[in-house]
Every structure is written in C-alpha cells, then in structure tokens.
Image: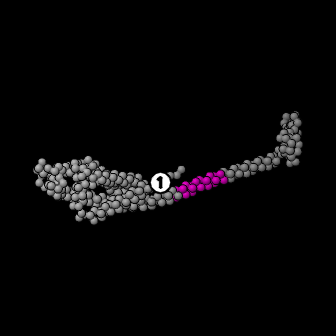
C-alpha cells in the first residue's frame, strides 16, 4: 500500500486582501441600496431627475452587491469561471463610471439650466414636489418668491422671502460631490479588485496546470508501483517454480539412490522380469515359496549340540 501526499496550496495575503476588498464593496453596494430606497420614498428628493435617480441607485447598489459577492465567493473557493465573470463585470462597471464621470465633467457648469428645467417640469406635472421642497428649504419660488411658487401665495402664507434656487443648487452640488467621492472610492476598490482577480486567475490557472501535472506524475508513480508489484509477483512465482523443480530433482535423486541401493542389496532383478510382488517388471525378485525359506545349516560339531 502506498500513499502520495501533496503540498497544501496557499495564496497568502493576496487572496485575503481581495476577499476583504470584495466585502467592502459589498458593504458599499448595500449602502447604495439603502440610499436608493430612501431617495425613492423621500419627499422632494427626486426633484432633479424624477424617479430615474433612485432607480439608478438601486440598480447600481444591487449590481455592486452581486458582483462583490461573486468576487468573494470565487476568491475563497478558487472558482476560475466566477472570477472571470467577476472581472468582466468590474471592467464594464469601471468603463461606465469613467463615461458618467466624463459626462458630468462636461456638464459641470450647466447646473443652473438643469435645475431650471427640472423646476419647470415638476411645476407643471407634480406641484406637490415643489411644495415639499419649499417646506424643506424654507423658500418660495425658484429664482425669487414670485417665480413659479406653489401655491401662488407661498410668500404670504409662509412668510418666506427668498427663492429656492441657491438652496437647491447648494444641495445639488453637495450631492454631486458626495457621489463623486463615493464613485472615486468605489472605482479604486473595483480597480484593485480587478487587478487582484486577474492575478488570482493567473495563479489559479497555473495551479490547475500544476495540479494536472501532479495528477499525471501521480498516475505514473502508481503505474510504476503497480508494475513493481507485478514484477515482484512474477519473481515470486519464478522462485516458487524453481523451488518446485529443485524439490522434484531432489526427489528423483533420492528415488534413484534408493533404487541403486536396492539393486546392490539384491532386492531388484536386473532383468526386471518375474512375477514379483510389486507387479510385472517391477524389478523385485519373486519371494520364495511358503515354507521353503533356507534354514541355517548345521555345523560339523552338531553332535556336540552346536550348529
């Protein structure tokens, strides 16, 4: 019986670091899910882009959570195809974030125009949102208290004396800065995670090649050991046959010696004839008839009582 022991595989700090990064990314995705849910149900929070913003945040949070979970699972369980899918999605996500960042940079100075169009759209389609915004920021109208307020008597009823543009613009810029910081952090995590996934993918591929080579070597060793066992068995069989032949030769020699001794003592007939007790042609003499055995002859001094 033989046992082949393989060395344990260990990828060290790289695997642990990528796992931690994926856990952090998963946490960010869950935070985005919470923020998207809050924005979707918060009054006046969807002023600029209607319901598109919370939907985008929810989709982004769900995607990041799923990709992070796949990355963590693939790293800890050494699943190459999961790492491949994880890296592909991360690459697409990074490309989309770069595109969104470029668009935001191009339109960074058009915030007033975007807010004005958004106010006008909401004023005609959903005045309730403007009412909530005015109550939240303690203002009336957009540019001033007479610029599309809700209701028309907002300044008189609530005694607000300023428009909402500056407050909304400040909140909008703060939100963009927060989104930019989160996007930069998330992009850095994704980039490092992508590089780590590529390194681990290469190592897993190399490890798979090494494992296949070890399997081949193990099969070869097992075949050699089996061949040695077969050779040992053949050698034992050969020795056993030789020992059996030696026993047979020795037995033949013993029989030949016994026959020669018997011939010398006269127990065998040289011609091998006669009806012997051992059968026809056995070489033994016929025994004398019953009662005809030779008796010792009397000596000359039998008269004296001797033989």
| Residue 42 seen anywhere in this rendered image of the structure | yes
Q: Is residue 282 left or right of residue 159?
A: right
Q: Residue 83's spot in the image, x, y percent?
A: 40, 56
Q: Is residue 299 magenta?
A: no
Of residue 220 and residue 134, the one placed in the foreground of this image is: 134
Q: Which residues are magenta?
A: 217-238
Q: Secondary structure at mark 1?
A: loop
In the rendered image, which quarter contains the C terminus? Answer: top right
Of residue 11 and residue 92, the one placed in the foreground of this image is: 92
The residue at the point 47 percent across, 54 percent down is 5
| Residue ID for mark 1 | 5
Of residue 183 and residue 299, the one placed in the foreground of this image is: 183
Q: Residue 145's spot in the image, x, y percent?
A: 14, 54
Q: Is residue 160 above or below residue 91?
A: above
For disc 1, the neighbor class at 10 Å (few under 14, some 14 to 19, many from 20) is few
Q: Is residue 276 left or right of residue 95?
A: right
Q: Residue 243's spot in the image, x, y percent?
A: 67, 51
């Amino acid at each position: 019986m033989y046992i082949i022991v393989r060395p344990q595989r260990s990828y060290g700090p790289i695997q642990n670091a990528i796992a931690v990064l994926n856990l952090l990314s998963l946490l960010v995705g869950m935070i985005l899910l919470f923020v998207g849910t809050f924005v979707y149900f918060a009054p006046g929070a969807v002023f600029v882009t209607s319901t598109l913003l919370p939907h985008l945040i929810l989709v982004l949070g769900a995607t990041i959570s799923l990709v992070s979970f796949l990355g963590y699972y693939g790293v800890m369980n050494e699943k190459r195809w999961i790492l491949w899918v994880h890296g592909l999605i991360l690459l697409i996500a990074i490309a989309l974030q770069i595109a969104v960042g470029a668009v935001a940079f191009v339109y960074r100075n058009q915030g007033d125009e975007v807010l004005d169009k958004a106010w006008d759209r909401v004023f005609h389609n959903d005045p309730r949102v403007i009412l909530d915004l005015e109550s939240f920021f303690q203002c009336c109208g957009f540019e001033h208290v007479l610029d599309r307020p809700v209701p028309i008597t907002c300044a008189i009823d609530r005694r607000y004396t300023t428009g909402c543009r500056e407050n909304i613009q400040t909140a909008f810029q703060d939100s963009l800065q927060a989104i930019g910081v989160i996007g930069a952090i998330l992009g850095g995590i994704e980039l490092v995670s992508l590089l780590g996934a590529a390194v681990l993918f290469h190592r897993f591929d190399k490890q798979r090649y090494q494992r296949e080579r070890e399997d081949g070597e193990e099969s070869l060793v097992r075949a050699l050991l089996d061949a040695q066992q077969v050779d040992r068995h053949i050698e034992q069989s050969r020795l056993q046959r030789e020992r059996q032949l030696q026993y047979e030769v020795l037995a033949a020699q013993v029989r030949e010696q016994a026959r020669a001794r018997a011939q010398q003592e006269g127990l065998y007939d040289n011609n091998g004839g006669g009806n012997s007790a051992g059968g026809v042609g056995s070489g033994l003499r016929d025994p004398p008839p019953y009662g005809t055995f030779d008796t010792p002859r009397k000596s000359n001094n039998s008269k004296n009582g001797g033989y």
